[in-house]
Image (tube, coloured by chain):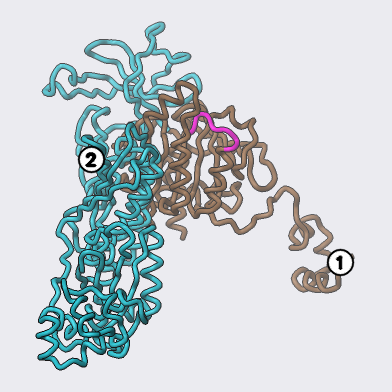
């Protein structure tokens, strides 16, 4: 197997110009080393990754399959020892995988791309095949055909080094995709979003990094909507973002057709090493669920709880983010400063005013006070509204449940505030 | 007449010199089964933490991979205390629980004091669904979705769902989701729902009594019906302090841990 192998992806001229930069990001999944060959080709250095993908044919099949999955226009693939040779093999349409000079020799000159004017000169010299051009004495060929063209030939055969500008994966991922037709349904958006996410996946693979969040921009003439997708931890697995996106799109109604999709992601992070972490799989699984719940139901509806040092029962619980281990640790550590008496598991959002009959609080029957009072008094420094002066009692209802009721010492009157369970 | 082989094995273990003819001897024979003892298939369960309850639950505890219905009216029927030992046990082994649409807010200090690790509880409360439910249009759709997702993901070790209005189809969907998972799955419904047919293999009714006992009615279980409720300690008026409260419902579990 050769040390270097270049895979050329050449998109057919009959179709629209390929978006090379997006495709280059996408191709990051196959190799981190690649070069753009405008206007229609990408060159991937795959010598180091061929074995990983199971050889030449397997790699080519995989590239085609992946492109088909994204519904991209299929390019011609050719694999050779130098980038120029790969590109020419793709153009010439001969054998598509070849590391020998013979295959290059047989390429028809007319089908290859050359510096301007070369094709006429070939015709004038009666040259048909690349082999014939190469057999011309070097000095004569330089004179008659041109230096630039002959150095192309030398590079193709590996006689001269081919110094190409390597594609640099941008530090911030931001790609746009013009939809073939303005999307009126979220279904059509999904299709375009899938392509962009595939590019993001390649970009991350090429950088060997992951991101925690990405933002979809839905662009129409002047307006722009944004969908932000957040994972619990940095990930390079774009299918997780895709699942989140599907939850969001399922609840989205488009008010106007969307012409362009934009996907951006920044602050990529190094991915944690997988080895040694026994719980990595669990963490991902749990994160996946909570991410999906959050994406569909919103942050206000999905949360963990933590006690908060406050005497007022209604302020003694705070919501913390359901995501992430940091917040979990926080939830476990803080709070608990305020010693509580016997408090109920359930609390009413707003205390419910109770009737008073014969000097007793009444809830579908008399409430029998079992124990109390527990005086709770605090919050005066937070203003009139938060000033709390209450005597709490545990009361038995007519159906034998235990309620948490209080008598408001300020406004007077009985209130139901919670249930023991 | 039984086949000779069976007779031989029975004969080995149970000598026939008169012993097999007494009633007790007959009942002790392994090839004779009493109708009132349920056939106990090897169900994966989690000990409820109450010996009296475990004794009547098929498999000896809360079933995994099956939906358990808790039927009671309103919050405050001992539902949290009943599940507390099992949830704590799961949380100690690193599991966490998802609470879907509890009817009221959780009062964090009380849960912490009762020994719950709040980091191991995730709450889903759907304000929109609640308003819809009040309007009577069956707004527990999202709650059902969340519960199904949770059970399908296998991430939480326990999923508790509160639903005021759940039709038989929703219960069936939850049971199917639960059957495909390892988690404990509980569905809290009003007591009146006991008259409806349900796909859940285990259904318990909860009722608190004036003296503070919790009566657990076995509305349905795999095995023979149980006419009498199981009584569990729930409330003690002396239980003002945290320690006493701890002893109240936590004791059975502690005993078990010591015994094990």
Camera-side residue of B149 and A393: B149
Say if B137 sits above or below A181 in the image: above
Colour used to depict chain B in the structure image: brown
Q: Is residue B167 magenta?
A: yes
Residue A30 lies in quadrant: bottom left
Which contiguous range is marked in magenta?
B163-169
Whole-percent x and y of residue B105? 35, 31
Disc 1 versus disc 2: distance between alpha carbons?
A: 67 Å
- Image position, residue A83 (x, y; %): 22, 78
Res. B113 in view: no
Q: Which residue is mark 2?
A: A336
> Which of the labelled discs sits on residue B82, or is there none?
none
What residue is pinned by disc 1? Answer: B2
Farthest residue to the front: give it: A124
Q: Residue at x 11, y 23 (%)?
A: A381
Q: Is residue A411 visible?
A: yes
Q: Position of residue B217 (x, y in %)?
A: 59, 36
Farthest residue in the top direction?
Answer: A358
Q: Is residue A17 above or below residue A294?
A: below
Q: Is residue B95 magenta?
A: no
Q: Which chain is cyan?
A: A
**Mark 2, secondary structure of its residue:** loop
């Amino acid at each position: 197997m050769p040390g270097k192998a270049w895979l050329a992806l050449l998109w057919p001229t009959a179709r629209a110009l390929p978006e090379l930069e997006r495709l280059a990001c996408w191709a990051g999944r196959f190799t981190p080393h690649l070069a753009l060959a405008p206007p229609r080709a990408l060159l991937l250095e795959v010598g180091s990754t061929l074995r990983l993908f199971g050889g030449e044919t397997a790699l080519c099949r995989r590239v085609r399959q992946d492109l088909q999955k994204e519904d991209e226009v299929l390019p011609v693939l050719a694999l050779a020892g130098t980038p120029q040779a790969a590109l020419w093999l793709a153009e010439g349409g001969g054998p598509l995988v070849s590391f020998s000079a013979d295959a290059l020799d047989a390429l028809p000159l007319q089908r290859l791309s050359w510096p301007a004017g070369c094709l006429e000169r070939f015709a004038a010299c009666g040259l048909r095949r690349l082999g014939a051009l190469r057999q011309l004495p070097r000095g004569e060929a330089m004179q008659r055909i041109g230096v630039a063209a002959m150095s192309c030939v030398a590079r193709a055969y590996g006689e001269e080094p081919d110094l190409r500008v390597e594609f640099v994966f941008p530090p911030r991922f931001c790609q746009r995709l013009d939809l073939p037709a303005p999307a009126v349904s979220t279904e059509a958006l999904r299709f375009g979003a899938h392509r962009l996410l595939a590019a993001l996946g390649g970009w991350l693979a090429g950088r060997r990094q992951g991101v925690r969040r990405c933002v979809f921009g839905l662009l129409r003439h002047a307006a722009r909507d944004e969908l932000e997708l957040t994972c619990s931890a940095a990930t390079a697995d774009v299918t997780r973002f895709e699942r989140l996106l599907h939850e969001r799109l399922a609840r989205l109604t488009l008010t106007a057709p969307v012409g362009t999709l934009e996907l951006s992601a920044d602050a990529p992070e190094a991915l944690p090493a997988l080895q040694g972490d026994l719980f990595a799989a669990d963490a991902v699984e749990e994160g996946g669920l909570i991410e999906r719940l959050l994406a569909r139901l919103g942050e206000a509806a999905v949360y963990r709880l933590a006690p908060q040092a406050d005497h007022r029962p209604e302020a003694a619980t705070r919501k913390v983010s359901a995501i992430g281990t940091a917040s979990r640790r926080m939830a476990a550590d803080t709070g608990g400063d305020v010693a509580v008496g016997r408090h109920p598991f359930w609390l009413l959002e707003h205390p419910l005013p109770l009737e008073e009959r014969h000097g007793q609080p009444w809830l579908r029957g008399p409430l029998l006070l079992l124990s109390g009072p527990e005086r709770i008094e605090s919050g005066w420094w937070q203003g009139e509204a938060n000033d709390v002066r209450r005597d709490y009692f545990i009361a038995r209802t007519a159906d034998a449940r235990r309620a948490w009721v209080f008598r408001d010492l300020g406004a007077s009157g009985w209130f139901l505030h919670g249930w023991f369970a | 007449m039984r086949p000779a082989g069976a007779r031989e094995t029975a004969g080995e273990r149970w000598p026939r010199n008169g012993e097999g003819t007494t009633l007790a001897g007959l009942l002790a024979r392994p090839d004779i089964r009493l109708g009132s003892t349920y056939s106990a298939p090897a169900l994966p369960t989690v000990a409820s933490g109450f010996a009296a309850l475990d004794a009547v639950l098929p498999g000896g505890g809360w079933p995994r991979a099956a939906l358990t219905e808790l039927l009671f009216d309103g919050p405050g029927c001992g539902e949290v205390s009943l599940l507390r030992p099992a949830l704590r046990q799961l949380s100690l082994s690193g599991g966490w629980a998802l609470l879907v649409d509890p009817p009221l807010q959780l009062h964090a200090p009380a849960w912490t004091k009762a020994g719950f690790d709040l980091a191991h509880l995730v709450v889903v409360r759907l304000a929109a669904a609640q308003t819809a439910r009040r309007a009577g249009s069956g707004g527990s759709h999202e709650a059902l979705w969340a519960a199904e997702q949770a059970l399908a993901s296998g991430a939480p070790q326990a999923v508790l769902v509160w639903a005021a209005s759940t039709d038989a189809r929703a219960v069936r969907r939850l049971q199917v989701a639960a059957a495909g998972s390892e988690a404990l799955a509980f569905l809290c419904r009003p007591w009146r729902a006991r008259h409806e047919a349900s796909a859940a293999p285990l259904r318990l009714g909860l009722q608190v009594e004036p003296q503070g006992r919790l009566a657990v009615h076995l509305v349905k279980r795999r095995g023979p019906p149980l006419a009498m409720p199981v009584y569990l300690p729930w409330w003690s008026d002396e239980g003002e302090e945290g320690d006493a409260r701890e002893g109240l419902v936590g004791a059975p579990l502690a005993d078990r841990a010591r015994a094990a």
